[in-house]
Image: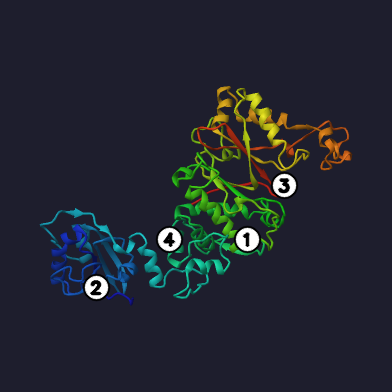
Amino acid sequence: MSAQPDGLIAVVKQDCPTCTLVEPVLKQIGQINCSLTVYTQDNPEFPQGVATVINDTTLENSYKLNIETVPTLLRFENGKETERAIGWHRGDWESVSGLTDLGTDLPESRPGCGSKSVEPGIAEKLAVRFGESKLAARRVEVGSLEDEMEACFERGWTDGLPVVPPTEERVLRMLEGTTRSPDALVGIAPPNYNECTVEKVAINAVMAGCKPEYLPVVLAAVEAVLTEEFGMHGLLATTFFAGPMIVVNGPITREIGMNSRVNALGQGNRANATIGRALQLIIRNVGGGVPGGVDRAMLGNPGKYTFCFAEREDDSPWESLAVERGFSSDVSTVSLFAASGVTPIMDQASREPDALCRSFAACLKSEGHPKHANTASPLLVISPEHTRRYKDAGWSKDLFRETLNQYLQIPVEELVSGAGGIPEGISENRTKDQKTMPKFRANTLYIVRAGGDAGLFSAIIGSWGGSKSVTKEIKP
């Protein structure tokens, strides 16, 4: 669109009560000021009685004039906008037009209606159509007879399941979920050490099926996974089962509808499923972490498609994982773990907290192998029914962890290679003057509460020792 001529411009649509209300005012202005141009968004015959009415049903002019509400009256001088009035307010219209006594038989003011150019899904189409999307990613042309889904498979962009084709419109819509610039650098993605920008994150979030409001969570997860502490390159290169898992805390879990309750670790929740999947696709498509390439997992685990859930903290008697790590309960966070899979804990008989601790410890001792000690700390997902045992007894989370760690001390004689007829184990040279060893390093254990109200089941999510869990704040 060329530069606007000097004078007055009004943008209207007939499907707006306020626009029809000001139709006589537009006629009144046009009779006095012949420079008035009216862009109409829906009916080229509306309004009546104005000399210059331009059909803007393509919405090009409305989009480039940045019209959010109709009616809007604008003044241009020397090719630049100098003033605008939004909706109908007599004083504002008189100021913009330079006229007096406008619409004296009308109400003093009326709010306008939303411009057609900002209706859901329209703004992105207009940005693409008029070449102002400012996306940097390479465009891939798909033939008219080529199936978009199959095109993504053939180009190696998927995790084995169909993805949403990342059209320019969809990516622009996804970017509405963040205030960050599309070209802002999020981090360097291994194993190929490519630059990962906000735009690239958005593209993969589209493919994963995310909503725009999920994007800040995905961005925080990417920031965490690309830290040196987390060690994503090593996690890819190991032959172990593990892949990145996301635990989300804070108000955003309720805002975007994440699942922390029934089937929290399973399928059925869009936010849980697509946020975790987006992270995995970014590792694959931006970093180049392709199975059989640098990704050398001997077996892997289903969580390498997606592994993300929220902690059930709104009715918890204990502080959350994020609060334990120094964040306020009002702050939303992601915590990243190198997770190897889920092992059930089933204890329906223990009624006393100490007995349940012993039961948990017995299950935890077999993590990885019963004869391994000083191993990487797993995540214990404790269910509400099991948590209730401790709440009713007045146990704090610290007391629970302290007691559990006491029962996770293992007699060295059980750990030594050859004990019990099992060659796996530790060397006797490592155990001089030691009677017991802790199952996990530094007696650490990550504890998260999640799950439905019914069921005396909890879970162990194993970890990989080459990675350190990282927590990041989620920002807009």
- Classify residue 58 by image quadrant: bottom left
Report how far apart the C-alphas of labels 4 and 2 lie in the structure: 27 Å
Task: Label 3: state its secondary structure.
Answer: loop
Report how far apart the C-alphas of labels 3 and 1 lie in the structure: 21 Å
In the picture, the disc for residue 55 is 2
- Out of 284 and 41, give the one closest to the viewer: 284
Q: Earlier in the sequence, mark 3 or mark 1?
A: 1
Q: Callout 4 environment at 10 Å: few (<14), some (14 to 19), or many (20+)?
A: many
Residue at 69% across, 41% down: 377
Measured from the top left, where is residue 362 in percent x and y? 70, 32
Task: Label 4: state its secondary structure.
Answer: helix
Task: Tell me, yes or no, whether the two marked residues, 1 and 4, touch with CB atoms within 8 Å.
Answer: no
Q: Callout 3 environment at 10 Å: few (<14), some (14 to 19), or many (20+)?
A: some
Q: Determine whether, in the image, residue 268 is placed left or right of residue 356.
A: left
Residue at 55% across, 54% down: 277
Residue type, mark 2 in image: Asn
